[in-house]
Every structure is written in C-alpha cells, then in structure tokens.
Image: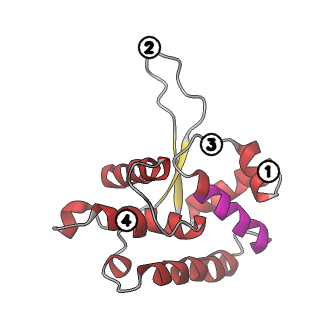
C-alpha cells in the first residue's frame, strides 16, 4: 500500500525545525498563516469524515478519547492497559483502535528491535503518527519549548518521519 507522507526537510529547502516540531510538515499547514487553526480543522475533519464515514469505530466519542491518549503517548513504548485507562475504553478496544490507525494511515506501530545481544530487547513497539503536527493537534499541544521532554519527543518523531 502506498501512502502520502508529509514533506521532509530536503523538500522544504530552508526549513524551520521549530515550526516543523510544532505544526508538522503537511504542505498546506507548513505554509499557512494560521497553522494551529488549520491543524485543528484537519484533525476534526479527519475524525468526522474519515472514521465516521468508514464506520471504522463504532463509538466516535470513545475513539476520539483514544486518539487524544495515543497522541499524548506517541513515540513512547506502547502500554495498552495505561492507554485504555486514559481513554476510558477496554484494552482490547485499544488494540482494535490501533488497527484503525494503521488502516487509515494516520499512525503506525514501529516494532521493537530484537536482534541485539548486548542488552535485553524491548518487549513492545512504539506508535507514531504520520505527521507531528497532527499528533500535536490531537494531543492539544500548541507550543513546544527547547530543552523540555516534549521537545525531545517531538524531535524523535521528526527524525522518524525523516527516515520513513
């Protein structure tokens, strides 16, 4: 399956990494005069039109809570029980929702590397959204300050997108 990814640094030219970490690199958003409002509208449209129209999630309110939780935990090791508690849905539903993220190309699971011999391999993967700006909009993160944990998480997400 082919997917359309956000722009990468080589496609933008003189790019602003701080802007990318906050608003992502979807072409219309990156060049927007009001990127936060455009991201919120994009995320809302996605929820209403894509998920609801495809019937991918039976309860849109529960899926919306899951998306917020998944966005907050994006780039961290997956813990279905913690995410289910935050989203107020059963862990088995969270597992199903991960399939929805993957099927709709908004997120994907990065499986853990298990071939290392020097240290114990990670037991769970990480989930990344297709664009850091969309992830921030779903999580409600409007700004990212250098030197914070959130900045480090966003930068890791940026590197993931660049490599992908």
Q: Which residue position is annotated with label 1?
A: 85
Q: Nearer the viewer, mark 2 or mark 1?
A: 1
Q: Which residue position is annotated with label 4?
A: 5
Q: Are marks 2 and 3 in contact (CB under 8 Å)?
A: no
4 or 3: tag closer to the N-terminus: 4
Secondary element under disc 4, as helix, strand or loop, is loop
3 or 1: tag closer to the N-terminus: 3
* Percent coordinates x, y for residue 100 in the rendering: 64, 62
Q: As drawn, is 89 to the left or to the right of 131?
A: right
Helix, strand or loop for the magenta stretch, by majority? helix
Q: Is residue 109 visible?
A: yes
Q: Is residue 105 visible?
A: no
Q: Which residue position is annotated with label 2?
A: 117
Q: Which residue position is annotated with label 3?
A: 78
Secondary element under disc 2, as helix, strand or loop, is loop
Q: Nearer the viewer, mark 1 or mark 4?
A: 1
């Amino acid at each position: 399956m082919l997917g359309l990814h956000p722009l990468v640094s080589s496609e933008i030219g003189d790019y602003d990494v701080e802007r990318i970490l906050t608003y992502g690199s979807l072409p219309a958003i990156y060049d927007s005069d009001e990127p936060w409002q455009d991201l919120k509208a994009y995320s809302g449209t996605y929820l209403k039109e894509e998920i609801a129209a495809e019937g991918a999630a039976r309860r849109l309110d529960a899926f919306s809570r899951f998306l917020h939780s998944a966005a907050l935990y994006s780039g961290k090791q997956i813990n279905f029980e913690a995410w289910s508690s935050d989203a107020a849905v059963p862990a088995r539903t969270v597992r199903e929702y991960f399939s929805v993220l993957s099927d709709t190309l908004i997120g994907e699971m990065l499986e853990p590397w298990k071939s290392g011999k020097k240290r114990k391999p990670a037991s769970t993967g990480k989930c990344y959204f297709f664009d850091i700006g969309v992830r921030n909009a779903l999580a409600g993160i409007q700004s990212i300050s250098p030197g914070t944990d959130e900045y480090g998480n966003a930068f890791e997400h940026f590197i993931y997108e660049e490599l992908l």
